[in-house]
Image (cartoon, rainbow, N blue to C red):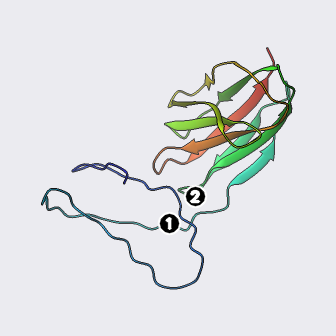
């Protein structure tokens, strides 16, 4: 349930289909409402993966398929402070998440600004962290990612 309302766009995150065949999309109007609905299915490209280097150069990412994300990893020490910096955003509204080594959320931010930062974080665990770039809805484009230790 994406919470779409009349005249709005709802985008459901990609679903991985286990076998070849025919699938059915069900649109269920609530409260006896009626409307015309257009549904588009996309073949989503694999997520872009890469590596960030602490205090290194920015890593440019270009997402060309609706539903595609970027997942960039870096290694950090327990107690280390890090800031994830985003520049050259041409995707419009984009959510960027910093994920802990166990995959749980450390922090996130959603912005359509051309440049923005996640709040500086003090990391409690040593290990490999992931920066996930997830453009909202059907947005596509580019963004550059950098991780620094202030």
- Residue assigned mark 2: 65
Q: Is residue 75 above or below residue 64?
A: above
**Quarter holding residue 120:** top right
Nearest to the observer: residue 54 or residue 91: 54
Secondary structure under the numbered disc 1 in the rendered image: loop
Check the picture and name the quadrant holding the N terminus: bottom left
Question: Looking at the image, do the residues carrying marks 2 and 1 touch, with CB atoms under 8 Å apart?
Answer: yes
At 63% from the left and 20% from the top, the residue drawn is 119
Q: Is residue 52 visible?
A: no
- Residue 33: image location, x then y, percent: 13, 58
The x and y percentages for residue 26 are 33, 70
Q: In this view, does 46 lie to the left or right of 150?
A: left
Corner quadrant of residue 134: top right
The answer to which of marks 2 and 1 sits earlier in the sequence is: 1
Image spot of residue 64 (x, y percent): 60, 55
Closest to the observer: 90 or 122? 122
Mark 1 surroundings within 10 Å by alpha-carbon count, few (fewer than 14), some (14 through 19), many (20 or more): few
Depth check: 84 or 59 in front? 84
Residue marked by disc 1? 42
In whole angstroms, how far apart are the C-alphas of marks 2 and 1? Answer: 8 Å
Would residue 36 appear left or right of 32 to someone viewing this image?
right
In the displayed structure, does residue 58 sit left or right of residue 99? Answer: right
Residue 57 to residue 7: above or below: above
Count of numbered circles in the view: 2
- Residue 148 appears at what percent x and percent y? 79, 22
Residue at 30 percent of width and 65 percent of height: 38
Label 2 element class: loop
| Vertical position of residue 122 compared to residue 140: above or below | above
Of all residues shown, which one is farthest toward the top?
150
């Amino acid at each position: 349930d994406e919470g779409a309302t009349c005249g709005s766009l709802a985008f459901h995150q990609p679903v991985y289909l286990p076998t070849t065949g025919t699938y059915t999309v069900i649109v269920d109007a609530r409260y006896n409402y009626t409307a015309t609905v257009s549904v588009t299915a996309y073949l989503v490209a694999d997520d872009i993966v890469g590596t960030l280097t602490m205090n290194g150069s920015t890593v440019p990412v270009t997402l060309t398929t609706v539903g595609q994300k970027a997942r960039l990893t870096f290694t950090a020490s327990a107690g280390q402070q890090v800031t994830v910096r985003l520049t050259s955003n041409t995707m419009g509204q984009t959510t960027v998440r910093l994920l802990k080594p166990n995959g749980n959320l450390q922090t996130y931010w959603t912005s359509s600004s051309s440049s923005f930062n996640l709040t500086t974080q003090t990391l409690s665990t040593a290990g490999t962290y992931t920066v996930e770039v997830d453009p909202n809805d059907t947005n596509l484009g580019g963004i550059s990612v950098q991780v620094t230790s202030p």
